[in-house]
Image (cartoon, helix red, strand yellow):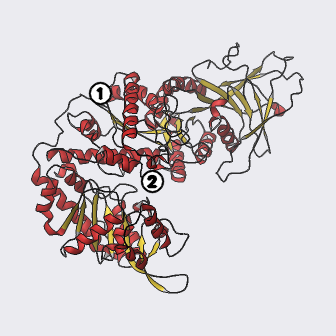
Amino acid sequence: MDELFTPPVDRWDPAVAGRLSGRDEVVYRSHLVGADPALTKEGGGNFSVKDVAVDRGGRTVEVLYMSAWGCDGATATPDDFPALRLADLLRLRDSGPLSESEMIGHLVDSGLRGEQRRPGIETLTHAFIPARHVDHCHPDAVIALTASPGGRQAAEDEFGAEAVWFDYRQFDVGVARELAGRIAAEPRCRFVLLANHGIFTWADTSERCYRNSLEAVERATRALGKVRCRPADLGGQAVPAPPPEAAEDLLAELLPAIRGTLPGTLLGAGRGADREVGRGAGRGVVLYLDRSPETVGFSSSVRGPGWTQEGPGCPDHLVTVGYRPLVLDRTPAGPAEVLAAIRRHRDWYDAYYDRHVAGPARALGKRDNGPRAVLLPGLGAVTCGPDAAKARLCADHLAQTMTVIRAADAAGGYRSLSQAQGASDEYWPLMRLKPQLRAGQEPLAGVVFLVAADDERADAVAERLAAAGAHVALAAPPGRHAAAIAAAAAISGRYGERRAVALVRDTDRGAVRQAVLAYGGFDAVVAPATRVTPTADSGAAGPPTTRVTPAAHSGAPVAPATRVTPAAHSGAPVAPATRVTPAAGGGALARAALPVFARQGRPGSILLLGEGGAGGAEPSVPGPAGDGRPRSDGLDGGGAAVHTIVATDPEAVARAAILLTGSGGPAWLDTTLVAASGAPETTTTTRGNP
């Protein structure tokens, strides 16, 4: 069974640990466990230590330092471990029935200080276990053992009286009391095996607690090896994988179509309790493509995809993947097959929701009924999230389910949560508070830009867009690729995982293809423009001028320009219109992007960066698509609005991009916008805009 699991790595450093005490001990241990994917995934598990602290009255009291709800152990800080009065928690051990809301109220009231973060839902279990250090994590090997048909007997044979087996239930005061009682009844007990979930370990020293987790994984792996009854190949390959180049060509067609229909936020915010979301609703979603050999092999196997329909490998996956991914039975020939499968998944999810989610659980609204993960035989898996980090976490959770299924199948089968239990957890109010569900609130959150990175100004524009929440694909000519890599790394380091990627623009179509494979698609192209001679349009009545005044600063790195008020039209003739056309490289990149907008099923935006006219004259576009006049830039039709931003300052460009592609973006047609750096207001000349 060793080939099925990457074993945990013993990272304990006595020189570091020996200098620590109290809360610092559990912070250090959480870093070791949280950073080891063999023990838990990002945001999973929780950790505690019992110690003493001084309250506001100067009294020394016993406390439980407990990791906060949903915090990531790998990056946790002392602030992520609120101090709770241990005596207040222990009083609940025998206090009689408690509702969930009463239990949460007690946990909050037990806090040593009111400004602390909310503790995790497993807090009472940590408090009731009579050991100084307690950990809960989600190792692949333990979950696979508990998910296999003979897992319970195999666990008893391996662990004996040293472990308690506990069938999965939502954590509440009853679970904490029952576990405490069963642990107390068996003095030799050192582990709790949580079916389909993970483990609890504990000890009186931090090192021993950590090593107990390592030991549990080693012994669970050994127990699975003893009951293995068939090859760990999930029945072998059912669907052949196309050659890599052909696979990527097909994915370049499929991903924008998938992006255009998948849920834009995991909460389905702003969509009403039961509204079905269809084509064009995916703006704000980022895709993650997993083409690893393990994932391609799993998606193409005889039994693997079918097992995923039985439920998740761990309840945490309900937040990201949902109860089950969408599975296709063959390599799709094109987008139509995938879109039809997504419609079928929506129908299934509606029935699942209607059947299993009761009235009180509907209070926070129905989640989007689209799949959050798609298994594509021969190609791999596609997952989504409101940003790149959450899309990758969804992929990590799906990968854990696949690992668990491989191991459990080799031991005879796979058992997960029932649909009723899955729905109960998915719509559990506490689960809905998980940080993994929160989408960014920045004005460009979830918006993806493809930027022609021809010079340092483009890098600076990309940085400002990322500051406003966007994801940016920097398409650089070969000579600037190294600079683009450095710029993308700096942006991601400052604003978040894969917030920017660097592409080689050998050809414009190639750059577009790379951007699609990186993010699933994009919403806007930023490219340079050049000015040509004035047209002979003088004497015509001028279009209305719109003044865009920046709203009060929201606290975001780039202040959005949101208040749009029409200025009085003078009726005077305007100066000859100046045609602003894409530069050679930028225009070709913009044209190559048009098929992506079409596959996504919604219009995109093309932002052409101009330098401004002599004497500050305002240029205007020679006519938007659809007004009966030809465009001067060769971008007629194609499902894109073409905007010219006349500015040299990157922050002014970003402010204009927020206006044109942010929350109000779809309402804007072809526009020329003069974005003056540092000016109190920005003047826009528009045709056909609100």
Residue 368 located left or right of residue 684: left
Q: Position of residue 422 (x, y in %)?
A: 34, 47
Q: Is residue 565 left or right of residue 326?
A: right
Camera-nearest label, 2 or 1:
2
Quadrant of res 572: top right
Residues at badges 2 and 1 in contact (C-beta under 8 Å)?
Answer: no
**Considering only vertical position in the picture, is 171 above or below 668?**
below
Residue 94 place in picture, x, y as percent: 34, 74
Residue drawn 44% across the image and 60% down it: 71
Instruction: Please report the residue visible at 32 percent of the width from the left and 70 percent of the height from the top.
Output: 134
Q: Secondary structure at mark 1?
A: loop
Up/down of 458 relative to 203, above or below: above
**Helix, strand or loop status at disc 2:** loop
Q: Is residue 201 visible?
A: no
Quarter of the image with the C terminus in it:
top right
Residue at which label 1 appears = 243
For disc 2, the marked residue is 429
